Amino acid sequence: MLGTRIITASLLLGAAAFAAEPDYFPLHPGNQWVYRCTGNCGDELPVLEIARDGSFNGTWYALLRGFHGRETWLRQDSDGVLWALDPDSGLETRWYSFFAPVGEPFDTGADPCSRSASVVTREFDYRGPAGRFDDVLQLRYGERACADAGANEEYFLPWTGIVRRVETTIAGPRTYDLIYSRTGGVTVIAEPHLSFGLHIDRSLYDVDFMPPVDPSRSIPVMTARIALTNATDQPVSLVWPSGQRYDLEIRNERGAVVWRWSDGKAFPAVFGEEKFGPGERNHTILVPLAGRDMKTLPPGRYTVTAWLTTEPIVYRASVGFEVRHVF
Amino acid sequence: MSSKALHMRFTLCLAALLCVVPAFAGADYFPLQAGNQWVYRGSGIRAAETMKLEVTQSAEFDGRTYYLLDGLGESDHWLRMGEDGSLLRYDPETKQEEVWYHFGAAEGEKYNTRLPGVCCGLAEITSRKAEYEGPVGWFDYALEVRYPGTFQVGIDREVFLPYVGLVNRGQGTGGPGYAHYDLIYARLGGVTHISEPELGFGLTLDSAVYTINLMPSPDPRQAQRLTARLTLRNTGWEPAMLVFPSGQDFDLLLRNDKGEVVYQWSTGKFFPEAVRRLPFGPGEKNFAFSVPLSDKEGNPLAVGRYVAEAWLATQPRSYAASVTFEVVHAF
């Protein structure tokens, strides 16, 4: 499986370099985890995130928006214990003891229906949408206080977080498996996927008219990156009716096109067809934020849209941004 | 947020990635894995240019694994990292290797290099704790390479980050002309994505081809499903203002190759009419959901090509993306 090969190699690099106890629940603000649910589930998939951080009585905590919409302030100590804070009472409850001896139960408040849990193994051979890993911590909850509800097991991948959660609901069993995570801002783990996106270097572009700036030269430049990623085991077919590979346009609030990358450009009338993937293809365009008259765009909101010039056009993305004049 | 504060945030992110190792002894300054990509933005006399490097494939020559680097100069280059920290280029015709970089060299020790674009064949590692501040952040553990003897034309200075690669190149372009290239995006090892502050939106599907199993009999309740993920990411200076005219956050529709809408996520759903103005960022927001690959009557989608179009339900519809996929039937 494609995802397995990539991910395992990268995590091994991380593990070797850390040379320390693994972090089974990274609490960096902005961390995101998306899960696919099997069993009796709804259409919307759960997204966990570290929404923000904060300080209570001089101690740092991170706010987790977790399963079933619960919000909890968390911190992890040097003994690998993940603590949950009740901001009203100031009391902490243990959620996980990641370094607890295997098989030794510990008190937990992570699930309202279970009061204890234990580490089954730290070498669980996990296979799921995001890949195969052989160093997963398996945690099993103890006797449940609720009749037909509560968590049964959770699985944690070092430096990533929960990769699987198995729970019982009144509607039947559910299993959540990780399909996407971004941790520490830069580490992305995902199931095989096909994606297209547009990225610009800011949401607000200031045009500096402060003297002695020459207004005719006050044209900010946007960096736009178009990314097609095929991380599946099936190449996708790209049919090119000409030598052009992409285009980009900017529309104002009234929907009028004020700039188009291909204007004034000529492309060879050469038909082309290719298979793409696995891989990622980036096109980067530097866009002067000026109209066709080469004058700075007026202040206001704009939408930039980019697409691959395939036949038919099927990869397209747009992003909004604002232009502000500063005097 | 100040420039320094923003850069510090990115620095911390990378520090987490790089594991806060006090000394980068034996660090990999040029990660060679197929699929690795680096995108650079020019400045100075090359302000209108970008540059992209990509490791496109690997192959065995004389019992050694080499990686093909595209984007540096006119041709592709087969490279490998030597045991002593040297980046070596292999010529399949002559079967000879030549040194491009000697990352393991002592600071101040000059070494010979055949790196394209270097005027005089000499290089020197001037620091392993150099400061670098650029689009992707601020760092104080960069490796700096200088090229002695460069006069007016040629690569003058390069900066590398451990486990990331080249982040900056300065080169003379003739006369007083000078150009810089700074890293603005890198994808490394499949899982590490580094970028300058950005605002982005994208649509991700879990497959390019969906096989609907019609055996033994089609059961709409067991329809094959597609997983779609909409990702809005803003790591820039300013929050992006999102105006939602109702309680609806997003929508998605599927079109067949005739342009007909065969599915829309919001059909049959009701949303409260309440205008919401939400500044977003810094951060990332994902909306993920599963979609049955069946038509409005519950029948499996016909064989063919489809387009998934998704958007945030903002006014105006500024954040949108589309991706194609194929449906095949298995009997």
Image: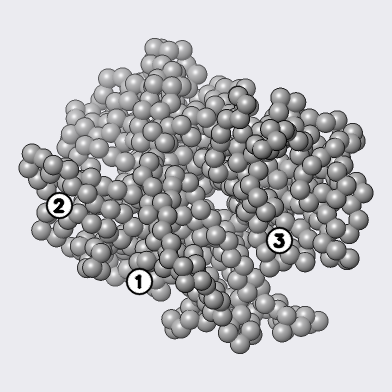
Residue plotted at (17% across, 37% down): A171
Chain ID for label 3?
A: B
Residue corresponding to mark 1:
B245
Inter-mark Cα distance, 1 to 3? 40 Å
Question: Which is closer to the viewer, label 1 or label 3?
Answer: 3
Label 3 element class? strand
The coloring applied to the image is one colour
Residue corresponding to mark 3:
B42
Going by the image, does B113 lie left or right of B69?
right
For the residues tagged 1 and 3, is the chain the same?
yes
Residue corresponding to mark 2:
B300
Q: Earlier in the sequence, mark 2 or mark 3?
A: 3
Residue farthest to the bottom?
A: A293
Label 1 element class? loop
The numbered dot on residue B275 is none
Q: Position of residue B36 (x, y in %)?
A: 57, 43
Q: Earlier in the sequence, mark 1 or mark 2?
A: 1
Q: Amino acid at mark 2?
A: Pro
Going by the image, does B269 lie left or right of A47?
left
Inter-mark Cα distance, 1 to 2? 34 Å
Q: Is residue B198 above or below residue A155?
A: below
Say whether residue A189 is visible.
Answer: yes
Q: Camera-side residue: B316 or B262?
A: B262
Residue plotted at (29% across, 26% down): A152
Label 2 element class? loop
Q: Position of residue B182 (x, y in %)?
A: 71, 54
Inter-mark Cα distance, 2 to 3? 50 Å
Residue farthest to the left?
A: B217
Q: Position of residue B267 (x, y in %)?
A: 20, 63
Q: Earlier in the sequence, mark 1 or mark 3?
A: 3
Going by the image, does A162 lie left or right of B105?
left
